[in-house]
Image (tube, rainbow, N blue to C red):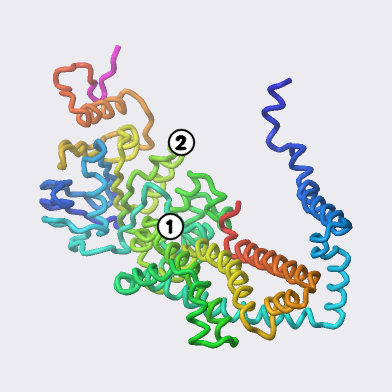
């Protein structure tokens, strides 16, 4: 689902990564279309976070390569922003000063408008300590989008939030993605979240891609039988359950009577 | 009900909270009471204890003829000069070794080794090398203050959250921005702990240094008074130290409130 021309194409070619003798990724090949929203799910330790860090340029691959917008990734690049699981705000800076770090030339106006786009313009002068967990994560999201990145990499940014805040944040991430048209790669262990947000879900298992599926649901997505079909199918892959024999899975458009 | 007694409401101040400002003065008042009682006793040994009124009279006399200020000013000067020299050096070295692996590899072990030598144990040596003049006192304060400043600055830089450093990398902070916006403020809390410890240790070392052949300062005032058996003056010197110590503590608290505002809701 291509949005605007803003997003970038990401290609992962025969990528492997070892930490010492420990192999984390083995021969991974993924191609992500410009402007696509891709979710990567898998159990903890399957290498999904490492993959994201390699795409961002924070770590270097052991072999194979990654290109963003047909350019080999050689290090951190301001077109690609990373949202961490923790907000990682500088506690001695106000919300707006934190967002400024992500704005081109550390521009105050850009920072304020990014804060407004996550609904926190009235908390600009607050220090992180007085903000709630969800608000801090919104500030970190504002910091990430302030520079109008062409790809946004999200490493379980909603993992530590409560259920209601999570739903709000999911809506916010989707809205920002629709408005700005960046390529989004979300790493999560929450299958429902992946189906809720992504055009395409990639399941990782045993250090490589195990399953790759397009989510053909209309947006905004609501839970229903079709949603449950994708959710179940992906969950079975994550849990290694063979769903061809279970017979209980529904296809899109089919409804249980 | 018993349950209500165990769990008082959160926004309601308990009786002990309300009384605390009064309660803290009960022990000092009792000590002064014992003091008055002891000085009025006929026991010979207790005659060496000056009466509170004698100490007060001495204070009034020394304040009115200005001699007390001379002692305080000369001691404070020595303390501050030593603090600035030793503190700045400790801060600089702490920053350097906290940030640079190379300088840390060269210097940290040596500094940590010298840290365990008590400054006062060097006194005989320092008298021979430096004499008993101003240099000795300032050098000793500077040396004593160097180590807490070094250790806390070093620790402060070393314990900055790796996550924040990685975030700085993602957002392309240059070296100057990294230093001024992450490392300096990130280590400040620990540095101010070093300042607080330094302000305390500064007086302790200075008093000891001033008791060794000096002709000015509060330590001199106390030593001289002891030789003349002016017990009220010895007491006054001790009170001045207590007040200066309290004042230093207050300065440390003010610095923390000023520079660590972001820690408070």
- Report the residue at 37% width, 71% height from top: B97
Are the residues under badges 2 and 1 in a single subunit?
Answer: yes
Q: Residue furthest top?
A: A257
**Is residue A10 or residue B122 the one in the foreground?**
B122
- Report the residue at 75% width, 83% height from top: B70
* Chain that bears disc 2: A
Query: Foreground mark, 2 or 1?
Result: 2
Could you say where residue A50 lies in the image, as x and y percent from the top left?
Answer: 24, 49
Q: Give the class, few, some or many, for how many residues have Cα within 10 Å of label 1's Cα (few <14, many ≥20).
A: many
User: Going from the N terminus, do you reach mark 2 or mark 1 first?
Assistant: 1
Q: CA distance from mark 2 to mark 1?
A: 22 Å
Q: Is residue A110 visible?
A: no
Quadrant for the C terminus of chain A in the image: top left
Q: Which residues are magenta?
A: A250-257
Q: Residue furthest front?
A: B44
Numbered circle sitting on residue A193: none
Q: Is residue A216 magenta?
A: no
Q: Is residue B237 left or right of residue B147?
A: right
Q: Is residue A122 visible?
A: yes
Q: Is residue B18 above or below residue A69?
A: above
Q: Circle 2 is placed at which residue position?
A: A162
Could you say where residue A66 lies in the image, as x and y percent from the top left?
Answer: 17, 56
Q: Quadrant of residue B138?
A: bottom right
Could you say where residue A190 lies in the image, as x and y percent from the top left?
Answer: 32, 35
Q: Is residue B54 left or right of residue B13?
A: right
Q: Circle 1 is placed at which residue position?
A: A143
Q: Secondary structure at mark 1?
A: helix
Q: Is residue B91 above or below residue B197?
A: below
Q: What number of labels is visible?
A: 2
**Is residue A72 or residue B106 the one in the foreground?**
B106
- Report the residue at 48% width, 81% height from top: B125
């Amino acid at each position: 689902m291509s949005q605007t021309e803003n997003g970038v194409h990401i290609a992962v070619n025969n990528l492997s990564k070892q930490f010492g003798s420990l192999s984390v990724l083995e021969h991974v090949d993924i191609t992500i279309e410009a402007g696509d929203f891709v979710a990567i799910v898998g159990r903890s330790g399957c290498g999904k976070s490492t993959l994201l860090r390699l795409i961002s340029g924070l770590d270097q691959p052991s072999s194979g390569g990654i290109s963003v917008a047909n350019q080999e990734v050689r290090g951190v690049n301001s077109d690609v922003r990373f949202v961490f699981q923790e907000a990682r705000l500088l506690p001695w800076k106000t919300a707006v000063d934190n967002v400024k770090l992500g704005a081109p030339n550390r521009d105050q106006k850009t920072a304020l408008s990014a804060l407004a786009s996550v609904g926190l313009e009235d908390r600009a002068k607050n220090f992180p300590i007085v903000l709630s967990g969800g608000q801090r994560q919104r500030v970190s999201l504002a910091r990430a989008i302030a520079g109008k990145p062409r790809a946004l990499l999200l490493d379980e940014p909603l993992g530590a939030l409560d259920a209601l805040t999570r739903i709000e944040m999911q809506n916010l991430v989707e809205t920002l993605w629709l408005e700005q048209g960046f390529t989004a790669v979300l790493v999560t262990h929450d299958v429902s979240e992946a189906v809720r947000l992504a055009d395409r879900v990639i399941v990782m298992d045993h250090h490589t891609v195990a399953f790759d599926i397009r989510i053909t649901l209309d947006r905004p997505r609501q839970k229903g039988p079709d949603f449950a079909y994708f959710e179940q199918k992906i969950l079975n892959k994550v849990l290694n359950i063979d769903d061809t024999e279970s017979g209980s899975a529904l296809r899109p458009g089919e409804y249980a009577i | 009900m018993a349950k209500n007694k165990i769990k008082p409401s959160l926004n309601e101040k308990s009786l002990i909270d309300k009384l605390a400002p009064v309660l803290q003065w009960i022990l000092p008042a009792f000590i002064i009471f014992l003091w008055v009682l002891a000085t009025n006793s006929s026991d010979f040994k207790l005659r060496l204890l000056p009466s509170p009124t004698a100490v007060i009279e001495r204070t009034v006399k020394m304040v009115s003829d200005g001699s007390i200020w001379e002692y305080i000013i000369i001691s404070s000067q020595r303390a501050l000069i030593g603090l600035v020299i030793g503190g700045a050096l400790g801060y600089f070295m702490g920053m350097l070794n906290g940030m640079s692996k190379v300088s840390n590899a060269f210097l940290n072990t040596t500094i940590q080794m010298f840290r365990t030598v008590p400054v006062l144990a060097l006194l005989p040596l320092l008298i021979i090398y430096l004499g008993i003049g101003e240099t000795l006192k300032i050098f000793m304060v500077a040396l004593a203050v160097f180590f807490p400043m070094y250790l806390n600055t070093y620790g402060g830089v070393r314990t900055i959250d790796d996550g924040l450093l990685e975030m700085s990398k993602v957002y392309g902070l240059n070296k100057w921005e990294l230093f001024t916006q992450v490392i300096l403020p990130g280590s400040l809390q620990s540095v101010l702990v070093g300042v607080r410890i330094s302000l305390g240790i500064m007086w302790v070392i200075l008093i000891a240094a001033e008791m060794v052949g000096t002709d000015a300062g509060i330590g001199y005032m106390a030593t001289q008074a002891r030789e003349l058996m002016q017990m009220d003056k010895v007491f006054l010197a001790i009170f001045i130290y207590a007040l200066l110590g309290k004042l230093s503590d207050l300065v440390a608290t003010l610095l923390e409130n000023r520079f660590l505002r972001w820690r408070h809701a």
